[in-house]
Image (cartoon, grey):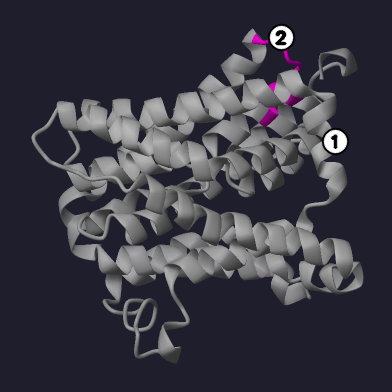
Amino acid sequence: MKFFDLISRYMAVLSILTAVAAFFFHHSFTSWVNNPQFLNQAVTIPVLLMIIMFGMGLTVKPGDFIVVFTRPKQIIAGELAQFLIMPLLGFGLSLLFKLPPELAVGVILVGCCPGGTSSNVMSFMAKADVPLSIGLTCVSTLLAPVVTPLLTAFYISLYQNQSAAPISVDTWGMFLGIFKIVILPISAGILINRLIPTFAQKVIRVLPAVSCIAICIIIGYVIDANSEKLFTHGLVVFVVVILHNMCGYGLGYGLGRLCRFDINRSDTLALEVGMQNSGMASTLAQSFFSALPAATLPGAIFSTWHNISGSVVASLMARRKQNCKPEQK
């Protein structure tokens, strides 16, 4: 168990090491991930995301949804922030930096995806409102099959008005894809947790580490497959991803204060908005925009970066609260 705990604890470090290894050692991941000759193509990007989502479902309890009904104002504010701020930021940054179409699609996809489960861990580290964080992640994930394809199609169409590049978006196919690789595994996890709780509790002990490994494999595959494009666009993608993430934190926190949330809830909103399910973004890019292979790149870089920035931001939030008077927390 200590080994699995170490994997979970050093997720950010493992992400960086994986990205570096994939960049310098060509075919270190593409030789077996998504390769039909390896285990009959059992190791694919969608399958890896389904494992992550199944793990999320196993950790969800019916009580986690109580916050949805007892604190609707905070949930509505959080979901509006999630699906308004990040997609608009992704679109705006794509225009500002004049990204080529394939990278713009990847950045917009990251923005249109729901919040990531990493935000729940960071909210705990930040001594923020963890039940609210879990509630927001669950609701945004359940909304994703409808909201993510529609927002993606909308912002890509706006982007196309600014460029001559024709990009088709299969909204119905994306809806079915998200339902299959996100909603079904989560539902299966929730069902098993409900019907076989003893089994679920045993599996939950290793699931964070399994999810970390799955995310690292996705990162490794995307970096390996696009290592040549990193030479051309690497710097600008890193800058856009960092700005996307950090502006999400700032605007999420600002909206929380505007809604007169206390520091804990505002911190939660900041982390929830700034940290995306970027693994889903890479998976959707690989599945529905295969003609634009570099579209997977922003999601992979975001996965690596937001774990680093989230750890730092959460630590600063927790330290700030230690120096606050009790009535200010």
Question: In which quadrant is the C terminus drawn?
Answer: top right
Secondary structure at badge 2 equals loop
Magenta highlight range: 259-268
Residue 323: image quadrant is top right
Question: In which quadrant is the N terminus drawn?
Answer: bottom right
Say the numbered circle drawn on residue 329.
none
Q: Residue furthest front?
A: 172
Residue 66 place in picture, x, y as percent: 85, 36
Secondary structure at badge 1 equals helix
218 and 83: which one is in front? 83
Disc 1 crowd rating (10 Å Cα; few below 14, some 14-19, many 20+) is some
Residue 199: image quadrant is bottom right
Q: Amino acid at mark 2?
A: Arg
Q: Residue at point 22% right, 30% down?
A: 159
Residue 265 place in picture, x, y as percent: 73, 24
Q: Residue at point 37% right, 69% down?
A: 221
**Does residue 308 show up magenta in the picture?**
no
Say the numbered circle drawn on residue 260.
2
The secondary structure that dominates the magenta segment is: helix
The residue that disc 1 covers is: 66
Q: Amino acid at mark 1?
A: Ile
